[in-house]
Amino acid sequence: MARILFVCLGNICRSPTAEAVFAAKAAAAGLDVAVDSAGTGTWHVGHPPDRRATAAAARRGYRMDHIRARQVGAGDFRDFDHVFAMDRSNLRDLERLRPASGGAKLGLFLSLAPDVGEDDVPDPYYGEDGGFDRVLDLLEAAGDALVEQLRRAG
């Protein structure tokens, strides 16, 4: 079973959306995966995802009501095979937080979908509601690529 963790800053917009999108795509593909999300910060620990993120995801059939924000911890680098950051700033934070014994592979989630033309999933929190749809477009593309990668790996 592949164990995948998605990480953004507060774990209320991008990473919980990535969790919901990828969990649905993996289930539809019949993949045996464990999926979670976390944030590098503590501001929203225990809170549900942003209502705008939840609404945008629901319009596409993704459920996020079960997700609660949490902060990434040292154990995550041991408990997950892959830790995908939503942007380069999150990746730098993860590289600093990663213990020497952490075996998880770190990377940018959008690196799996180079055709989208972006490296970073933009943070929609302070923008217009349409930003959440753009985030979904990007996460769906990267989610499809990850499903295909895991299928090939067997």
Image (tube, rainbow, N blue to C red):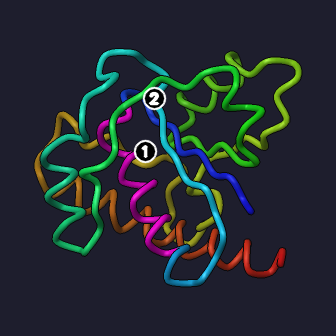
Q: Is residue 55 left or right of residue 92?
A: left
- SS under mark 1: helix
Indicate yes or no whether the magenta region holds residue 96: no
Is 47 above or below relative to 24? above
The residue to which callout 2 is attached is 39
Using the rendered view, name the quadrant where residue 11 is placed. top left
The residue at which mark 1 appears reads as: 15
Pointer 1 and pointer 2: residues touching (CB < 8 Å)? yes
Residue 118 numbered tag: none
Instruction: Magenta stretch: give its range.
Output: 11-25
Q: Name the spot of residue 76 as percent of width and height, x first.
A: 66, 31
Residue displayed at 78% across by 43% down: 105
User: Hey, what amino acid is under mark 2?
Assistant: Gly
Which of the 4 image quadrants contains residue 12?
A: top left
Q: Amino acid at mark 1?
A: Ser
Image position of 126 with respect to 18: above or below: above
Nearest to the observer: residue 69 or residue 132: 69
Judging depth in this view, the residue of 127 and 79 nearest the camera is 79
